[in-house]
Amino acid sequence: MRPTDQDELYMRLALKAAEAAFAEGEVPVGAVLVGKDATITAYNLKERRHDPTAHAEMLVLRKGGEMWGRWRLGGTLYVTLEPCAMCAGALIQARIDRLVYGAADPKAGACGSVIEVAREPRFNHRMEVLGGVLSGESEHLLQRFFDRLRGREIVKR
């Protein structure tokens, strides 16, 4: 399956949210939930909230539930980094129809990189998954963040 122009548009919104996380010193991961009722964005806030569950995906799902008054959210979730097991499980619980992510996560990815949660046939819900959309931009932002964190950021003149 190939990404559509719409997929790239929403992934750019997720990247914009990830840049906001970067500016706040958070791991730069952004998420956009697109439903029939609205489009909602969020980004990682683990550091600010001192909350290990404050991943971009979890926050956008919480906002969606509050805004739409339901837990069965459906729709498409765009996120700049492949979801972890916690987030992939939450996407199943929220009955997300489609997941589109940017960079693969070879250390914690639960949508094919390390384990496969999103399409596990034994769960009561599965979603369509498309990875690698604008992955270069997502990877570059993550690399910049971790280079800065480790004091290795190269200043371009």
Image (tube, helix red, strand yellow):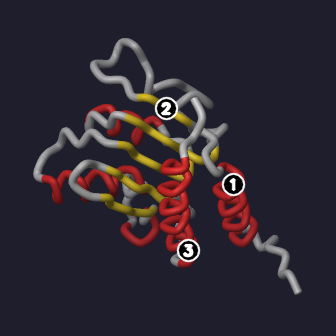
The vertical placement of 123 against 11, above or below, is above
Residue furthest bottom in the image: 157
Q: Which residue is mark 1?
A: 139
Question: Which residue is drawn at the image coordinates 49% and 32% (left, top)?
Answer: 129
The image quadrant where one finds the N terminus is top right
Alpha-carbon distance for marks 3 and 2? Answer: 29 Å
Residue 143: x and y in percent read 72, 60
Please name whichever residue, 36 or 68, is drawn nearer the observer in this view of the structure.
Answer: 36
Under mark 1, the amino acid is Glu
Real-space Cα distance between discs 2 and 1? 19 Å
Q: Is residue 116 above or below residue 102?
A: above
Quick one: 89 or 67, which is closer to the camera? Answer: 67
From mark 1 to mark 3, how far is it between C-alphas?
16 Å
Name which quarter of the figure residue 140 lies in. Answer: bottom right
> Which residue is farthest front?
5
* First in sequence: mark 3 vs mark 2: 3
Q: Residues within 10 Å of mark 1 (few under 14, many from 20)?
A: some
Report the mark closest to the observer, 2 or 1.
2
Residue ID for mark 2 = 129
Q: Are marks 2 and 1 in contact (CB under 8 Å)?
A: no
Residue at the extreme right: 157
Residue sitting nearer the eye, 72 or 84: 72
Classify mark 2: residues with Cα within 10 Å, few (<14), some (14-19) or many (20+). some
Image check: 85 left or right of 72?
Answer: right
Disc 3 marks a residue whose amino acid type is Gly
